[in-house]
Image (cartoon, grey):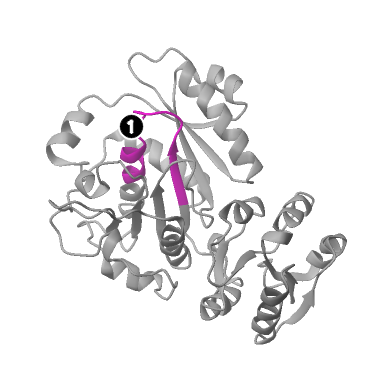
């Protein structure tokens, strides 16, 4: 039985007075019983029958420490008072599914409460994944694109959203050959209020022939002063997270969206990359992230998978060997429509690991 469906109450654990009133009002608009929690000591027993939990920055870290003892914690929705900003560090700490600015996003909050009955793990093939490199030059963007392509070629109607959230990546649109296609880029995308749904987002973006929608920076000859902020990135990933399909975010460890269900960490089989990965994993563990480690073998790599595991204190889920000629192929014509066997195998292993 679906865990969310077997529970009946909405827990409102909001410390800020005005925000608390808004949250209670929203929860009361549903058909579920509402329990308000003002004393942190009451949180553990309140979660037992929770359908979902509404939390703010004041209660987020209390909830995070409580969740460690829960075998099946309820979906967490993080709230911040209008006009924001959202405290994403606090949202990460309590492993929030989504974040909202209230009352501006009250409609989206109500929709998210309704969607809690159908979490992403109940929708086959659906996941929101961040792909992060432990060090430079490990092929993070290429692997992010390969994950999206692998998903789209796995089924007739499978689709994926590939989000470029790295400021100086050069553009995932170039990697997939959609730089000249019409469609919205980051500067044209106006979803700061969270009012767009997943289907609208897919339709607005340039897409590859095999069904990958690409959200990247504008391709322009004039000076572009646009800067991607955390609020806009969160809005895009939250919209994708609520829909069907795989969402892959190429980002850094500093801007992982709260709605990402997993973090794929690409690590080179080298001492410095493994040492950097060990530090990143500590940070991700503190934020209660589910981590999948991909070991990138390069021709000059010196470490084996067991040696890297000893350094990072984490299991290596998949290994990616050197694919001869891939760099030149991408430079000339972008990522191949038919992935090289080794790259396809690694991408498939990661998708299976995250349940996509």
Residue appearing at x 75%, y 70% in the figure: 50
Task: Say which element carries label 1.
Answer: helix
Left or right: where 17 falls relative to 314? right
Using the image as rendered, state which of residue 92 and residue 6 is in the foreground.
92
Left or right: where 138 falls relative to 339? right
The picture places residue 282, in percent across and down from the top left corner, at 62, 34
Name the image quarter holding residue 334: top left
Residue appearing at x 64%, y 46% in the figure: 288
**Vertical relation: 72 (above or below) 352:** below
Using the image as rendered, state which of residue 223 and residue 146 is in the foreground.
223
**Vertical relation: 295 (above or below) 142:** above
The picture places residue 166, in percent across and down from the top left corner, at 36, 45
Label 1: few (<14), some (14–19) or many (≥20) C-alpha neighbours in 10 Å: some
Find out whether residue 132 is within the magenta segment.
yes
Q: Magenta residues?
A: 129-146
Find out whether residue 166 is within the magenta segment.
no
Name the image quarter holding residue 156: bottom left
The picture places residue 113, in percent across and down from the top left corner, at 60, 75
The picture places residue 58, in percent across and down from the top left corner, at 72, 60
Name the image quarter holding residue 187: bottom left
Q: Quadrant of the N terminus?
A: bottom right
Using the image as rendered, state which of residue 241 and residue 102 is in the foreground.
102
Q: How many marks?
A: 1
Residue appearing at x 13%, y 40% in the figure: 333
Residue behind mark 1:
342
Left or right: where 329 falls relative to 310? left
């Amino acid at each position: 039985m679906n865990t969310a469906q077997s529970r009946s109450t909405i827990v409102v654990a909001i410390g800020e007075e005005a925000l608390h009133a808004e949250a209670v009002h929203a929860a009361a608009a549903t058909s579920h019983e509402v329990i308000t929690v003002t004393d942190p000591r009451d949180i553990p027993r309140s979660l037992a029958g929770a359908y979902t939990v509404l939390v703010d920055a004041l209660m987020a870290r209390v909830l995070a420490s409580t969740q460690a003892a829960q075998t099946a914690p309820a979906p967490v929705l993080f709230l911040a008072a209008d006009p924001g900003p959202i405290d994403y560090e606090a949202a990460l700490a309590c492993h929030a599914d989504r974040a909202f600015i209230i009352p501006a996003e009250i409609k989206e909050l109500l929709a998210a409460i309704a969607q809690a009955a159908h979490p992403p793990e109940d929708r086959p093939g659906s996941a929101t994944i961040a792909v992060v490199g432990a060090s430079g030059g490990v092929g993070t963007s290429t692997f992010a694109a390969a994950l999206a392509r692998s998903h789209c070629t796995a089924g007739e109607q499978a689709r994926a959203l590939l989000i470029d959230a790295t400021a100086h990546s050069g553009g995932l649109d170039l990697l997939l050959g959609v730089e000249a296609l019409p469609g919205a880029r980051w500067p044209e995308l106006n979803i700061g209020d969270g009012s767009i749904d997943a289907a609208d987002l897919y339709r607005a973006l340039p897409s590859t022939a095999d069904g990958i929608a690409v959200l990247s920076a504008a391709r322009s000859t004039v000076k572009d002063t646009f800067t991607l902020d955390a609020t806009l990135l969160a809005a895009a990933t939250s919209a994708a997270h609520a829909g069907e399909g795989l969402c892959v975010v190429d980002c850094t460890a500093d801007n992982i969206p709260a709605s990402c269900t997993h973090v794929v960490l690409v690590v080179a089989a080298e001492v410095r990359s493994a040492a950097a990965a060990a530090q990143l994993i500590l940070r991700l563990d503190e934020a209660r992230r589910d981590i999948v480690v991909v070991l990138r073998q390069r021709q000059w790599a010196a470490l084996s998978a067991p040696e890297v595991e000893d350094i990072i204190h984490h299991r290596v889920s998949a290994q990616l060997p050197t694919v001869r000629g891939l760099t030149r192929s991408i430079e000339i014509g972008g990522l191949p429509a038919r992935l090289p066997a080794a790259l396809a195998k690694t991408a498939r292993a990661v998708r299976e690991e995250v349940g996509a």
